[in-house]
Amino acid sequence: MSSPRTAKGKKPAYFADPATDKLLQMVITLAGELSVVRDRLDLVERLATEAGAFDRSKLETMRLTEADTNERDANRADFVARVLRVLDQDLEEITNREAPGFDELVPMLGKTD
C-alpha cells in the first residue's frame, strides 16, 4: 500500500486552538470512512440478497478463521493510521525541522526575556 500524499502549504485553521482543528480533521476523516463503508455494505447486501446468497442470521453466528482475523486486524491498523494521519503529519513536521546551528543557538540561550 502506498503512503498518502502530503499537502503542501499552510493548513487551514478554523478554530483558535490548533488541537480543535486536528480533532475536526479526524472527525471528518472518520465520517468519510463511515460513509464509504455504509455504501459498500448496502451494495453487498443488495447483491447477495438478489443472488439468494444472503442470510442475515449468519451475521451473528459466523466465526472467522485466523487468516480472516489477521486480515481484519491489518485493515483496522490501516484505518487507524488514516484517522490519526493529521497527528503523524505534525510529528513529521517537528522531526524534519532543521535544528538550529551552534551560532544560532548561543544567542537564543543567552536571552533572558
Image (tube, rainbow, N blue to C red):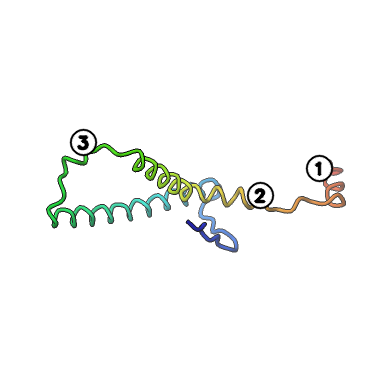
Please name the residue shown 66% across and 49% down the image: 94
**Badge 1 local density, few (<14 within 10 Å), some, or many (20+)?**
few
Tell me what residue is drawn at x 83 percent, y 48 percent. Answer: 105
The quarter of the rendered structure image containing the C terminus is top right
Give the residue at mark 2: 94
Check residue 113 in the rendering and tell me which mark sits there, or answer none. 1
Q: Closer to the camera: disc 3 or disc 1?
A: 3
CA distance separating discs 2 and 3: 48 Å
Helix, strand or loop for disc 3: helix
Mark 2: amino acid: Ile
Task: Write down the quadrant of residue 62 in the picture.
Answer: top left
Q: Real-space Cα distance between discs 3 and 1?
A: 67 Å
- Residue of label 3: 61
Relative to 111, is 69 on the left or the right? left
- Packing grade of label 3 (10 A; few <14, some 14-19, many >=20) is few
Which mark is in front, 2 or 3? 3
In the image, 92 versus 103, the foreground residue is 92
Q: Are marks 3 and 1 in contact (CB under 8 Å)?
A: no
Residue 88's spot in the image, x, y percent?
Answer: 56, 49
Marks 1 and 2 sit apart, C-alpha to C-alpha, by 24 Å
Query: How many neighbours does mark 2 have within 10 angstroms: few (below 14), some (14-19), or many (20 or more)?
Result: few
Residue 109 vertical position relative to residue 15 in the rendered view, above or below = above
The tag earlier along the polypeptide, 1 or 2, is 2
Of helix, strand and loop, which one carries label 1? loop
x then y, percent, for residue 28 = 42, 52
Residue placed most toward the observer, 110 or 82 = 82
**Mark closest to the chain's N terminus, 2 or 3:** 3
58 relative position to 64: left or right: left
